[in-house]
Structures are given as structure tokens and as C-alpha cells.
Amino acid sequence: MNPLSKLIIEKINKDGPITFEKFMEMALYYPELGYYSNPAVAIGRQGDFYTSPHLHPVFGAMIAKQLIEMWEILGKPSEFHAIEIGAGEGYLSKDILDHLTGRSHEIVNSLKYAIIEPFEHFEKKQRELLAEHEERVTWFQSLKNISAQINGCIFSNELPDAFPVHIVEMDNDLKEVFLIYDEGGFVEIKQDAKTDGLIDYIGQFASRFPQGYRTEINLRIREWLHEIASILSNGFLMTIDYGYTAKEYYNEERNRGTLLCYHDHQINENPYEHVGEQDITAHVNFSSVKKWGDEVGLRTLGYTSQGTYLVASGIDEMITELYAGSPDYSAEIKKIKGLIMPEGMGESHMVMIQYKGEGNPELRGFSLRNHVRKL
């Protein structure tokens, strides 16, 4: 039994059964021992999973292209803030900044790039990777540390899927999953769902669950959107993650939810193994992101799959610009297909862009297909 498991057990012994959300929070974020907070845990291609920036730098170049379009829509302000939340080892930041500075684009003179990073070991890796851009980048531990109102874009890649979630199950009435511990390990028990917001959430996004139905509810997205709206004066929120509309998420056939764990590049469904040593994720209900965003003035401009978004945004033009005539052209195309094709991240990952400001901007990335109405 590792030290983190012992701490969770101590909490249960002291306070009684804990929600799955509290367990997931400790497993991922407990200081020095959680999966993301432990400096000894490898994240990324050398660890348990990899993301789009690990597949190919053209992904970052396309985000840079999107930032330019947003800057132009806002009237080319003298200060344009690009704030990345959860930058991991910093590969996406590097690819964005490499692309913009390498082409000396006009936006560079306006760009104020920031990374929200609560963990020192990640910030250290980011600073090392971004050494040539360090003068352009500012680090903050939290969105709350940004005191001024900003104009620009706040963005993330695979962030809300790692927010701790509640697990609920329909057992005549709605029950919430709690954890106790016995000598055999962590044991789930079901208690009446009394956590604030759960019943209301189901009324908004699911209506009802059939008997035996089990799923996750992410309430932390709402607080996250409030924090973003409080600092974003005029601009965009871009969220890239795997997820569904509420109708797809809470389909009767998806009766065991979406919770998955990643350990040594292997997927499993047991969050109670390798505590603090494996990632735990749940898909994002993008309908909740839209609805709760609307409530704080973040209007959804577009929602579509990553593959469709990248094609509509002109990834073919970017490939030609970067690799035309290169002897490695075929090899590069093979890697890039993982970002676009359904068997890669093209269909599993979704892109949502929300907007706070005047007018109703149209973004190129949603010109082929925009599924906002399905939300």
C-alpha cells in the first residue's frame, strides 16, 4: 500500500465514507503524491498517455493560426493575451510560439502569452523547453492570480476530462457512490444523492436514468467557467477534449459511464488500483459547457470534431507551407493523420469555442460543420 492510499484511508477512518469525487481529487492532485502533482510520475509519451501536441507540431501551428484569426476579429489589439491552462510539459506552447516567432507574424508584437500551472515540476519542465521564448511567457499558479481583465483567448487541450467527478447510480432512487475501506481494499457503497447540484444537473441534462444506470457528473466545470468569465473582458475560450453532447453522453446504452484509467499506456476501468500512479478521466459533457457558459456571458460560436475543425481551418495549407518539397513529407503526413482521422483523434476529440464580446464572429474552423444546435 502506497502513502497516498494510506492518507485516503485515514481520511475515511476520520470523516466516514467519502465521495468518489473526493477520492479522484486526492488520487490526481494531492500535494506531492497525486498523479499530476507527483514529480516522479512521467506524463506524456514517456508516461501513460499522449495528446495531440505529442503527435505532431502542426497541431500547435494550427492553434497559432486560430489565435491570429481571433486577434484579427478583435481588431488587432495592442495587447492580445493567449492563456494556456494545463500546459503539461509545454509542447503545445512551444509549437505555438515557434510558429508565430519563426514567421515574425504581426501578432507577435501584441502577444502576451501565459501558462496556468499549479505544479512546480511541470513549470520547471516548461521553462526548460521554452527557454528561447521565456521572455514572452508569464507563469501563474491559478486563474485567480490574474487580477486584470484581459482581451484575447484562454485555451486548453485535454483539461476538463481530468476534473474530479461524482459517480451516480440509479437504484430505485438516485444514489451517489461513496467509498469506504476494508482489508480487501476500497469498497463502493451507495447513499442518497445529497450533494448540491446533482439532482438539478440530471434535470437539465439527462431528465431521467433507467434502473441500474451508472455514470459521472462533472460539477467543477461550472466553477471553472465562472473563473474564466471573471477575467475575460473580451475574447474567446477554446476547449479541446474528448466528450459528447448530453444526449450522446447519457444515452441509455452508455449505462456504465465513461470513466477510464491510464497506466503504462494501458487502459483499465479500475480507479482503485495504482492510486496516485495512474490517470483517471471522464469524458466532457459539452452541453454543460455551453449552458453554463451562456450563464456567465460565454456564447458558444462553434462545436465540432477535431478532424473537421483542422480541415476547415486549413491544415492542408499548413502542411504545404511547412513540408512541401521535404524528403520527409510522407512520414510527416502519416503522423498528421492521427490528428484528423477517425481512428486517431479526429473524431474522439471535440473543439468548442465560446466568445465574450460584441457581435457574433464566424470562425473558419466551423465553416464545414458546426454542431452547436445539437448541444
Image (tube, rainbow, N blue to C red):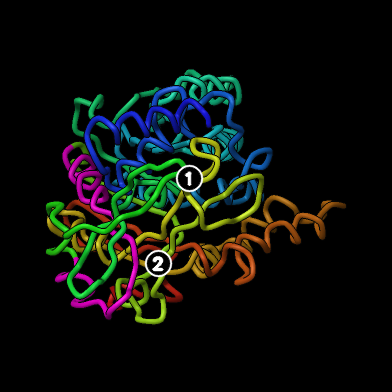
Number of on-image labels? 2
Quadrant of the image occupied by residue 82:
top left
Secondary structure of the residue carrying numbered label 1? loop
Residue 82 visible to the viewer: yes
Query: Which residue is drawn at the image coordinates 22% and 34% (left, top)?
Result: 15
Query: Which residue is drawn at the image coordinates 37% and 67% (left, top)?
Result: 303
Which badge, 2 or 1, comes first in the chain's sequence?
1
Pointer 2 local density, CA inside 10 Å: few below 14, some 14–19, many at least 20: many
Q: If the image is split into quadrants, where does the C terminus sit?
A: bottom left
Quadrant of the image occupied by residue 361:
bottom left
Q: Residue 258, how many percent across, how many down? A: 43, 64
Residue range of the region highlighted in magenta in the rendering: 202-230
**Residue underneath mark 1:** 184
Q: Are marks 2 and 1 in contact (CB under 8 Å)?
A: no
**Residue underneath mark 2:** 257
Residue 114 visible to the viewer: no
Q: Which mark is residue 277?
A: none
Q: Residue 126, how many percent across, how many down? A: 54, 26
In the displayed structure, 200 sits above or below 172; it is above
Residue 217 sits inside the magenta stretch: yes
Q: Is residue 8 left or right of residue 331?
A: left
Q: Which residue ends up furthest to the right in the rendered image?
A: 327
Residue placed most toward the observer, 188 or 88: 188
| Mark 2: amino acid | Gly
| Mark 1: amino acid | Gly
Query: Mark 2 against mark 1, which lies toward the viewer?
Result: 1
